[in-house]
């Protein structure tokens, strides 16, 4: 890379409005949308109005690779920016504008164009996917992808699109970063889509709507498993699989550090129940932070076998102490079910 940069004699003008490319984007608690960009021309400064695809904003803060704040970023500089109104896609070009009004108008015009291209198709059942492909009833398999970071989302999108064949085409109708929301489920319901969640979980209300409307939500932590399941479903080869059955969800209200034991969370069960034998998944803004087992479950000072919705409890997670107030804990079990999609 250094050799090529030297031979090509790459040059840029630092005395102009900046332009460059998005490398990655994500949502962080307390910081909002954070995008990592590479400045390729001009100088990006704090306060600059900026437009990236159908997103816009004003640069609220700049941070280098070590997290240190800085006021400007010149050509050839990778930098984290805050202040956008939405998540840009990796590979999109950004441009600084003279004023925020121009940036907003450009972004809104692009968003209108994207909406015009969206095609909503009638709902259908996905339980007999392979049969409908064979009968010629299904030409496209619509998929909604939600992931924890932009990079994972892009990798999933590319991998799934490669599965398109002569009988059926994989059509990615929506992608996004963050937990699975109600709007994601409603889009999938209206567009005959399967929802793929990668290291994220559905919001409580979104899960209820999906169950009511029969929307299939598939949750994964390994990209290969996603691709393999979709391929086998299209070929009618899905074998019996292990399915997660969610028992309930718990919200952390307070945390306590006890020497020789670790961090104990004071919680309230907000839905379903939690059992001492449950597998648990720690969620922060509906993104999976840790997956493991309970180290303890108590009601007041007594050990508890289970705690039901509406009651309070104290718990610890085996081998993990980074518990924070407002985190949620999802309790689940694993069941073996027939392979359908």
Image: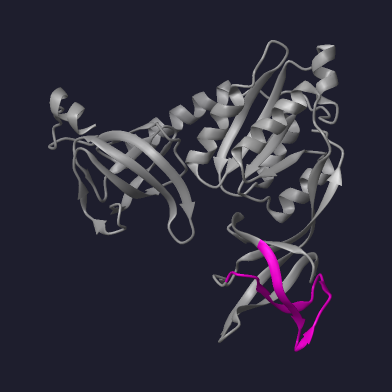
Q: Position of residue 328 (x, y in %)?
A: 65, 64
Residue 308 lies in magenta, yes or no? yes
Side of 155 relative to 294 (left or right): left
Is residue 257 visible from the viewing direction of this image? yes
Which contiguous range is marked in magenta?
292-320
Q: Is residue 334 left or right of residue 80?
A: right
Residue nearest the viewer, comparing 113 with 239: 239
Question: Quadrant where the N terminus lies?
Answer: top left
Q: Nearer the viewer, residue 116 or 294?
A: 294
Q: Residue at x 21, y 36 (%)?
A: 17
Quadrant where the image shows the C terminus: top right
Reply above or below: 235 against 55: above
The answer to whether 215 is drawn above or below residue 324 in the figure is above
Within the magenta stretch, is there residue 26?
no
* Percent position of residue 332, x then y: 77, 58
Farthest bottom residue? Answer: 301
Say which of 312 and 232 sits in front.
232
Judged left or right of residue 247, residue 316 is left
Does residue 137 appear in this view? Answer: no
Give the vertical position of 273 relative to 190 (above or below): below
Residue 25, image x, y percentages? 43, 44
Tally of numbered tags: 0
Residue 12 pos. (x, y %) = 15, 31
Of 260 and 299, nearer the camera is 260
**Which image quadrant for residue 289?**
bottom right
């Amino acid at each position: 890379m250094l050799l090529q940069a030297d031979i090509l004699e790459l040059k840029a003008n630092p005395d102009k409005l900046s332009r460059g490319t998005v490398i990655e984007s994500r949502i962080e608690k307390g910081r909002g949308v954070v995008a990592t960009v590479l400045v390729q021309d001009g100088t990006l400064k704090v306060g600059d109005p900026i437009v990236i695809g159908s997103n816009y904003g004003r640069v609220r803060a700049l941070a280098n690779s070590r997290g240190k704040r800085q006021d400007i970023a010149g050509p050839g500089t990778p930098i984290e920016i805050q202040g956008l109104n939405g998540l840009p896609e990796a590979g999109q070009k950004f441009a600084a504008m003279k004023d925020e009004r121009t940036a907003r108008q450009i972004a809104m015009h692009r968003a209108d164009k994207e909406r015009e291209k969206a095609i909503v198709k009638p709902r259908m059942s996905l339980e007999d996917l392979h049969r409908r492909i064979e009968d010629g009833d299904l030409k496209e398999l619509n998929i909604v992808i939600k992931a924890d970071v932009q990079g994972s989302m892009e990798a999933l999108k590319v991998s799934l699109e490669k599965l398109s064949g002569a009988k059926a085409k994989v059509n990615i109708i929506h992608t996004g970063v963050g937990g699975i929301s109600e709007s994601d489920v409603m889009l999938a319901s209206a567009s005959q889509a399967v929802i793929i969640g990668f290291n994220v979980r559905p919001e409580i209300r979104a899960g209820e709507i999906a169950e009511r409307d029969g929307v299939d939500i598939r949750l994964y932590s390994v990209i290969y498993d996603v691709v393999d399941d979709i391929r086998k479903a299209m070929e009618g080869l899905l074998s019996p699989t292990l399915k997660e059955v969610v028992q309930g969800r718990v919200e952390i209200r307070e945390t306590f550090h006890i020497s020789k034991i670790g961090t104990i969370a004071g919680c309230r069960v907000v839905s379903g129940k939690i059992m001492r034998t449950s597998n648990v998944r720690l969620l922060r803004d509906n993104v999976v932070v840790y997956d493991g087992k309970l180290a303890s479950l108590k009601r007041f000072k007594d050990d508890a076998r289970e705690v039901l919705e509406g009651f309070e409890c104290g718990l610890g997670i085996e081998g993990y102490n980074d518990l924070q107030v407002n985190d949620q804990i999802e309790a689940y079990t694993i069941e073996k079910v027939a392979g359908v999609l």
